[in-house]
Amino acid sequence: MKAGLIALLVVVFAALCAAQTRPNLPEIFEADATLNVTMGSRSISAKGYWRSDQPAGKGVEDFTFDEPHGNRTYRVIQRYDLHNIFRISSGPTKCVSHRTQGEMPPVWNFLHSAKFNTTTTFNNVKVDLWEFAGPGFRVTLGVSSSNVNVPVFLRTAHSAETTTVTFNNWQTNAPNANWFSVPSICHK
């Protein structure tokens, strides 16, 4: 009886040790990033940054695509405090705004329902993969195996397109208010 109880405790302890730690990523962050978008056999890449202050309702993603006929910039400024999302693109420069309602959703909200998939290597970094799937899409987050609160990449896959954001220089510093300034072209 005593040996059976000890064996059961060893099995339970081993199972607890083997469980993966769920990432708990902050909603205030900044990171340089590389964006890769694949549509069928066509793939385009961009470099830029992603910054978020979700508690204040602000976010910005700014990427420059290297295209054969010149660079093209695409910027999305989320200003839930102003009830708008602004999409700014170059060539020619234009701004399109979309009204929002309510508070800015948490960037990492999907992690509550994500499941651990496996551990693998991505760009020479050992990562734990967390996945969330819904009708017609899949979100995969690769976090550093040595620190699960540091994302390495975020991939969203739909039937026609796969988008991968690779994070560099991940930091959780207090946000700079200028990051989220809305350009004058959006006020016309």
Image (tube, rainbow, N blue to C red):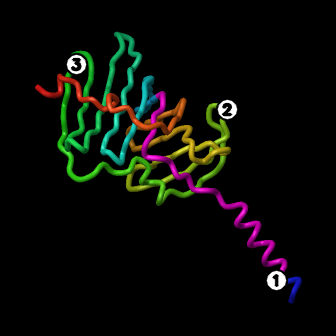
Viewer-side label of 2, 1: 1
In the image, residue 13 above or below residue 100: below
The part of the chain drawn in magenta is: 6-34
Label for residue 93?
A: 3
Q: Position of residue 141 (x, y in %)?
A: 52, 45
Q: Name the residue under label 1.
A: 5
How far apart are labels 2 and 1 at the CA level?
Answer: 43 Å
Q: What residue type is labelled 2?
A: Asn
Circle 3 crowding by C-alpha within 10 Å: few under 14, some 14–19, many from 20: few
Quick check: 95 left or right of 170? left
Depicted 122 relative to depicted 112: above or below = above
124 with respect to 90 (left or right) = right
SS class of the residue under badge 3? loop
In this rendered view, identify the residue nearer to me: 154 or 104: 104
Dot 2 lies on which element? loop
Q: What type is the residue that disc 1 sits on?
A: Leu
- Check if residue 79 falls in the magenta segment: no
Give the residue pinned by disc 2: 124
What's the mark number on residue 135? Answer: none
**Looking at the image, which is closer to me, 121 or 22?**
22
Q: In this view, does 10 lie to the left or right of 35?
A: right
Which residue lies at the image location 84% right of the left edge and 83% below the top edge? Answer: 4
Q: Report helix, strand or loop for mark 1.
A: helix
